[in-house]
Image (cartoon, rainbow, N blue to C red):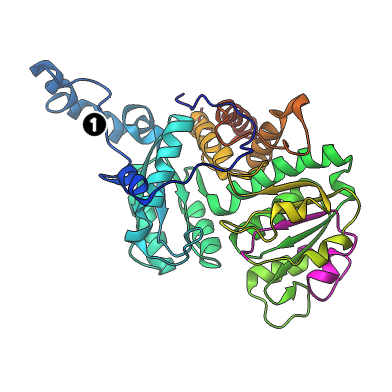
């Protein structure tokens, strides 16, 4: 597996300024290329790689389709698919403008997990068209990473593509975020000596990431989660709820809390922000002792770490220039590597929980308030996550082997 070699735990100082010229130079010509695994130097090489030899492999795959996994690149290939409608920090910028992000995602796959990945940007926001296009293209690749598709369409698209295909499919904005949040929270609770079944969690944001975080926290044993959107606490009886928010209303807020952030944060143990909004400092003193604050909006956290640290024992952000960066790169390369190594037909909830445990376990005895999750460049992460995910896939019977 190709991985980075930096095993630093956190980035404690801001990066030096990066000039526009340096940024554009780093993207000129794109960030990806296709490379041959075997040389084409002789007539014999050509006869094996192409005609006439290739016909034998084609015929074998026609008779036994599973051979495509081992005798084409599909078994090691992830399609990173987006319509560019919800690009982090940029919003709805369209397919073509989102391509540098998707190329970057593919580069992360290759660097951290050794998997090949190709960017596919679709010039449509129509749910039916996106689903149909992915399904028709599916023989080309072994897994699908959905990326930067706006809510609530992202939920339906993921569900329908998963239903139609027998390969791993995951919307990373949802589940990658949720996995790393759970990993970091696992260790944050170790720091403050609290348990999943005893804490009160406030979750600001009911979009793709917020819904997935709420679900994975429930799977991990957190029973008291209060979710807020731009209009306040999501609760049964609100007349403006989408189907997704109706699910949140039915499965969160067990104390039937009403109101806004001030009410929600009263005696809360954990705040998790994935909303892009802001939190006023005046609300934080209401939280419980030894509070945990994850302000994950990028590039601007809901509340800055220097302020949050005055009231919380553990603070995390989505940024690389502060300790405890909640970064999806800790999750998705290993999750897809493990799923493809197992020949999995799905990425299950148990596989995501296993990924979170594997990430959390790497912190080990180095646990500290400013180190509850490994650094984004920690070379141990992807192999550990892949191994854990593959083991669960094999045990759960979703692996082809």
Q: Is residue 263 rendered magenta in the image?
A: yes
Task: Between residue 234 and residue 401, name the one nearer to us.
Answer: 234
Q: Disc 1 marks which residue?
A: 59
Horizontal side of 193 relative to 161 (left or right) equals: right
Residue at image location 68% in from the left, 41% down from the top: 324
Outermost residue, bottom side: 239
**Residue 273 vertical position relative to residue 363 in the rendered view, above or below:** below
Residue at image location 64% in from the left, 64% down from the top: 275
SS for callout 1: helix
Rendering quarter of residue 378: top right
Horizontal side of 208 relative to 143 (left or right) equals: right
Q: Is residue 358 rendered magenta in the image?
A: no
Q: Give coordinates of residue 74: x percent, y percent.
A: 36, 36
Residue at image location 70% in from the left, 59% down from the top: 303
The magenta stretch spans which residues? Answer: 251-276
Q: Give coordinates of residue 143: x percent, y percent.
A: 44, 42
Task: Between residue 322 and residue 208, name the one nearer to us.
Answer: 322
**Residue 41 vertical position relative to residue 173 in the rendered view, above or below:** above
Task: Between residue 1 and residue 47, name the one nearer to us.
Answer: 1
């Amino acid at each position: 597996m190709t991985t980075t070699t930096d095993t630093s735990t956190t980035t404690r100082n801001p990066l030096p300024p990066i000039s526009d010229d340096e940024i554009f130079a780093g993207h000129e010509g794109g960030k990806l290329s296709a490379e041959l695994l075997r040389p084409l130097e002789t007539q014999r090489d050509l006869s094996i790689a192409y005609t006439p030899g290739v016909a034998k492999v084609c015929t074998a795959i026609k008779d036994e389709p599973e051979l495509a996994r081992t005798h084409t690149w599909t078994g090691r290939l992830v399609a990173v698919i987006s319509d560019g409608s919800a690009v982090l920090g940029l919003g709805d910028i369209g397919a073509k403008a989102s391509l540098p992000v998707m190329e970057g995602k593919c580069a992360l796959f290759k660097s951290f997990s050794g998997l090949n990945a190709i960017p596919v940007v679709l010039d449509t926001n129509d749910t039916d068209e996106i689903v149909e296009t992915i399904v028709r293209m599916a023989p080309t690749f072994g897994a699908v990473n959905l990326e930067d598709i706006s809510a609530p369409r992202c939920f339906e698209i993921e569900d329908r593509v998963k239903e139609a295909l027998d390969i791993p499919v995951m919307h990373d904005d949802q589940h990658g975020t949720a996995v790393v949040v759970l990993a970091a929270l696992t260790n944050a609770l170790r720091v403050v000596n609290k348990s999943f079944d005893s804490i009160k969690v406030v979750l600001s944001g009911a979009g793709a990431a917020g819904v997935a975080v709420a679900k994975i926290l429930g799977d991990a044993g957190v029973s008291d989660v209060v979710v807020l959107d731009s209009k306040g606490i999501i609760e049964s009886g609100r007349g403006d709820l989408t189907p997704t928010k109706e699910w949140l209303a039915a499965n969160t807020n067990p104390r039937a809390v009403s109101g806004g952030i001030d009410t929600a944060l009263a005696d809360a143990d954990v705040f998790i922000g994935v909303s892009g909004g802001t939190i006023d400092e005046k609300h934080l003193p209401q939280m419980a002792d030894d509070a945990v604050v994850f302000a994950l909006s990028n590039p601007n956290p809901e509340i800055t770490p220097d302020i949050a640290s005055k009231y919380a024992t553990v603070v995390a952000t989505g940024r690389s220039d502060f300790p405890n960066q909640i970064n999806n790169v800790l999750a998705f390369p290993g999750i897809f590597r493990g799923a493809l190594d197992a020949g999995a037909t799905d990425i299950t909830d148990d596989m995501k929980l296993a990924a979170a445990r594997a990430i959390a376990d790497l912190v080990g005895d180095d646990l500290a308030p400013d180190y509850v999750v490994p650094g984004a460049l920690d070379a141990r992460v992807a192999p550990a996550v892949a191994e854990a995910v593959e083991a669960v896939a094999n045990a759960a019977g979703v692996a082809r082997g």
